[in-house]
Amino acid sequence: MAVIVYGTHVFTKLAGYFGPREECPVCHRVYKKGYVKITRWAHLEYIPLFPYKKTYFKMCPVCGMGVELKNKEAKPEMAVADDGYRQDFEAYAKHVLAKKPTGLLATDNSYEFWIKDLMTGEEIRVESDITKDRVKQIKKSRGYKKVPIVNA
């Protein structure tokens, strides 16, 4: 008897920062919105076969709050003429070693997630007291290729 493994997998990729600068209603920072392309693939035996759904997520680059858009809605928004304002960010996580847990079932929630605005040099702490798994979730949801972990 053979077992066939099938299902879906989600791939995310940061498409870029587009549109006019807007104030985020949550964190009140003024930046262009980031667009994350979300592609859902059907797979067989863990081999991606074909994409069956593509959507975009328009979000604040600092706090990550936003809205999901259909492909038809996102393409015109991303095609708007550039206003000349360049925006670039670097994401990283800090591991605060002073908070190392003790005990058999202790959870290491001594990570902090940071965003650095490369144009102004400003560093913004997004989340603190989180686990390494949460750092990976943030990385995937924002479409980053890698998020380095530095010791603080």
Image (spheres, rainbow, N blue to C red):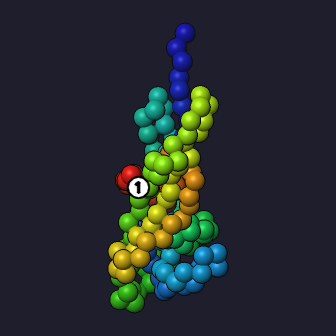
Against 122, residue 44 (above or below) is: above
Q: Amino acid at mark 1?
A: Ala
Q: Residue 77's spot in the image, x, y percent? A: 50, 78
The answer to whether residue 133 is left or right of residue 13 is right
Q: What residue lies at 60% left-to-right and 68% top-to-bottom?
A: 65
Residue at 52 percent across and 83 percent down: it is 30
Label 1 Cα neighbours within 10 Å, binned few <14 / some 14-19 / many ≥20: few
Q: Residue furthest bottom?
A: 83
Q: Position of residue 4 (x, y in %)?
A: 53, 23
**Please, is residue 63 above or below residue 152 in the view?**
below
Q: Quadrant of residue 116?
A: bottom left
Q: Residue at x 40, y 90 (%)?
A: 83
Q: Is residue 20 above or below residue 89?
A: below
Query: Could you tell me residue 124's position as x and y percent?
Result: 48, 71
Closer to the camera, 1 or 96? 96
Name the residue located 38 percent from the left edge and 87 percent from the top edge. Answer: 85
Observer able to see residue 72: no
Mark 1 — residue? Answer: 152
